[in-house]
Image (spheres, rainbow, N blue to C red):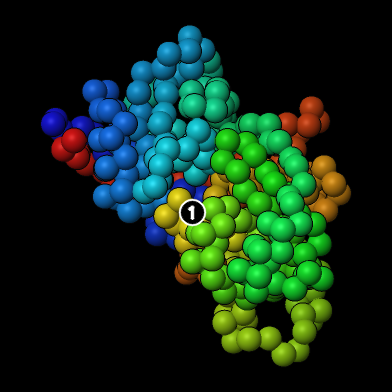
Amino acid sequence: MKTRAFKQVDVFTAKPYLGNPLAVVLDGTGLDDAQMQHFAKWTNLSETTFLLPPTEPSADYRVRIFTPGGELPFAGHPTLGSCHAWLQAGGRSKAPGLIVQQCAQGLVPIRPEGERLVFAAPPSRLSAPSPTLLAKVAAALGLKAQQIVAAQLLDNGPVWLGLLLNDADTALALRPDHRLLKELGQKVGVAGIPAAQEDASPPLISRSNREARAFARSDDEGIGLEVRAFAAPVGIEEDPVTGSLNASLAQWLIAEGHLPSRYLAAQGQCLGRAGRVHVSRDAEGQVWVGGDSVTCIDGKVTL
């Protein structure tokens, strides 16, 4: 064991403790898979990353990403948080204005936009879920068939069952049966587009629904999508803010005309967080996903 530089970063927020925390070991050399997995389970965060020298000539660094339950080929908030930590620790990119991250999914371009970092969303493979899976997931979420506008399996490394619901309030009011979701072995991402006006909401909504919606809109009124991510199969009942899911949702929902080419997503409000995900699609069709990051813990870890 040796002492290694370590940071804990809050991602998709400019205010500490309102986003999704990420543990970053800045030097993962010499650690094997079991050691990395053991530490990730110990941190008990949705993801823990280990930075390593790249093996691809064009990459600036390599990252391995672990949840408490296993390794991921790619994930969004670990991409932004790891890059933030790497830059803060003195990392310098090979190309001006562009950082290239190597992960199991491949090379991920990252660029600064002011103080914010944005990553190029990897291609997402879309496929129709089976009616049986969709029915079982809907039952676990307490959804009626008419509340689901569209559904797709989204695969950009992590595989999510993406559900577009009839409105944002439906998404915020969900109280899933996480045991059933774990048994199904399928991570589920739900999204709802807020009503154009507050008065368009039904007059009788639950108190928890009102509170969740009010929290989501407390900082700004420009929210284009409300998102929740349920990942019981990998040990996380609900993820505070999820870059990979938001990336896949953007590619799907923009392409099908449900959302404009630039919007702001909110996630985490039902957990007392206020994650903000900045999404845009450029003229070439590339989707970029960005967010602020802030370091909350800066020190050393013995591993």
Question: Which of 120 and 262 lies nearest the eye of the viewer?
Answer: 120
> Quadrant where the N terminus lies?
top left
Q: Residue 51: x percent and y percent?
A: 35, 28
Q: Residue 218: x percent and y percent?
A: 58, 71
Q: Can you name the residue that lies furthest to the bottom here?
A: 204
Question: Which of 31 and 23 lies nearest the eye of the viewer?
Answer: 31
- Based on the displayed image, in which of its 4 quarters is residue 167 positioned? bottom right
Q: Can you name the residue that lies furthest to the front here?
A: 132
Give me the residue at 74% from left, 40% from top.
Answer: 126
Q: Can you name the residue that lies furthest to the right here?
A: 257
> Quadrant where the C terminus lies?
top left
Q: Residue 204: x percent and y percent?
A: 72, 90
Q: Residue 19: x percent and y percent?
A: 47, 56
Q: Amino acid at mark 1?
A: Pro
- Residue 240 in view: no
Mark 1 surroundings: few (<14), some (14-19) or many (≥20) residues within 10 A: some
Vertical relation: 197 (above or below) 122: below
- Based on the displayed image, in which of its 4 quarters is residue 132 positioned? bottom right
Vertical relation: 103 (above or below) 248: above
Q: Which residue is mark 1?
A: 233
Question: Which of 247 and 298 lies nearest the eye of the viewer?
Answer: 247
Vertical relation: 126 (above or below) 263: above
